[in-house]
Amino acid sequence: MRNKTLSDCYSLFIRSQNAIRHGRRSYSTPVQEPKPYKSIPGLSSLPILGPMHHFLPIIGQFGPKANIFDLIGTLHEKFGPIVKMKGVFARADAVILFQPEDIDQVYRVQEANPLRPGFQTLEYFREVTKKGTLDGKYGLTTAQGEKWRDFRTKVNPALLKLKLVKVYAPPLDEIAQDMVQRIKSLKDDQIYIQNHFDLEMNKWSLESVAFVALGSRIGCLDDTQPEDHPGRQLMQCSKDIIENAFELEFLPSVWKYISTPAFKKIMKTYETQWDISTAYIEKARKQINARGHDVPDEEKSIVERLLAIDEQVAILMANEMLMAGIDTVSFTATSVIYNLAINPDKQEKLREEIRSSDPHKRYLRACLKEALRLWHVVPANLRRTDREHIVAGYLIPKGVDVIAPNEFLSRMEKYYPRANEFIPERWLADKSDPLYYGNAPQMVTLPFGFGIRSCIGRRIAELEIETLMKRLFDEFKVTWEGPPIKVVNKVTNAFAKPFHFRFESAK
Ligand code: HEM
């Protein structure tokens, strides 16, 4: 006998409930079956192209969309609370859910085994190119199921169970001060700032996350380093990964069959990043061994804790942090600066708090939360179904990417009054205030993802950003002198040039 599917069980359940309600034991009552998967509204699909033709200029019904936010909004308007997109080039189908309770239903049930496909090229690099060197370990972003759970269980204590502030506040503050000095020396060259502010922010975020991941300063904020210095090479790696990953991971690509130039480039980049991480981790190991292990536990760094598991885990985790902790942090920090630049009253309020003796910088934390609500770095979260689900009356089979369009939902007036305004106060308001953030369901705003597979670097990111903001707004009055900033989608959200920031002394 074939195994019962979820829809069979659901039908039986409905029948039995109806029978009980009507005092009968028979299963003959007509039941409301879930609607079939194929009837979920959405875009029609062509062989190979999938639904892409809808976004072609002139002939497509939607035309090219500037960013994912606009695309999601258009789909919601046309199709309603559940929308299907056929997969392109053997990629999985996607279903977008617009009701927080529907997202909750899928994401919570999947929690035992949260599947989130990562970069397929990185998976290839780790599983094929590095086969034999990794001893069955696959990292966090690329692994699924047992392999993911095993790795995450190993590294969670090293990253999450330490007094981050005690170990990292002083070095991150030193990096923030260097960054402020750098802005001081560059700020009068308006053309440079307009065209390179994103690059400068990336240098700061790489320098910060590298200190955590590799255990050393790597000199990204120092222009005197030669071209082949590891800091500059890692900077280049991060840029090359973003540029090539979009083409290889999100657009139809034939790299699985033919080794394309973009594929060769990304493999070389992963190799360079791997070699540099290995060299730094080796250096850290020698330094720790020379110092000896007899130090209080709360003084041990993340690298030391990871090395205590084993060296491969430390290298893999360093790679993960270098992949996931640069653009995400620089984008969010830029968002905080921009939102405060266009809201001078809120910037003044923050400056007062920064300069006050109150150690709890609650307004600063609220500014960060509000910036993250307005622009999620990752505009949507994703889980691939590992079983059938019945959602919004439809059957969703196994192997479908269920998308939670969190950035779009976080800008809906029904969840956040004055949703498009930057109002940090909503994160401090009490329950009686209509602005109170808690009026929005939990699944609406998820900038760091959900549950046991959520961002492992969250606290590191928050500490890095808050440390920079304290130094920056103490030093400068920041204004924005130009049209509103624009968000474009690369692998994650990114800001488009030019950057019309002006930095004046606030002292
Ligand atoms: C503001 C900055 C950041 C944002 C908004 C962010 C956001 C996210 C999101 C949305 C996810 C997916 C979570 C899910 O599927 O539920 C994620 C995963 C991840 N993030 Fe971050 N992230 C940030 C910074 C960082 C940093 C600094 C690091 C490293 C130090 C990092 C490392 C990771 C890793 C390794 C994962 C994969 C976790 C897993 O699959 O178990 N992130 N992040």
Image (spheres, rainbow, N blue to C red):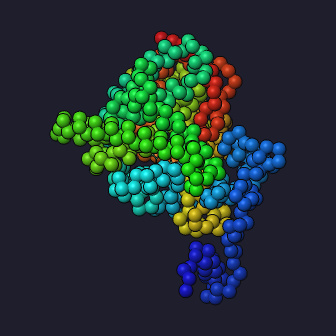
Q: Is residue 261 above or below residue 226?
A: below
Task: Name the residue at 66% across, 31% down.
Answer: 486
Report x, y in % for residue 194.
Answer: 61, 21
Quarter of the figure with residue 489: top right
Q: Give above or below for 72 relative to 24.
A: above
Q: Percent from the top left, x then y, of residue 312?
A: 33, 49
138, 229: nearer the viewer: 229
Q: Residue at x 69, y 83 (%)?
A: 29
Q: Which of 388 and 232 lies nearest the eye of the viewer? A: 232
Q: Residue at x 45, y 61 (%)?
A: 145
171 relative position to 64: left or right: left
Q: Which residue is at 58% across, 53% downward?
A: 258
How many numbered circles are shown?
0
Q: Nearer the viewer, residue 269 or 376?
A: 269
- In the displayed structure, does residue 449 sit left or right of residue 76? left
Q: Is residue 130 left or right of residue 336?
A: left
Position of the N terminus, as image quadrant, is: bottom right
Q: Is residue 365 visible?
A: no
Residue 251, position as x, y percentages in the image = 64, 48
Residue 339 visible within the image: yes
**Which residue lies most toward the right here?**
58
Image position of 203 with respect to 189: above or below? below
**x and y percentages locating residue 477 in the rendered image:** 54, 16
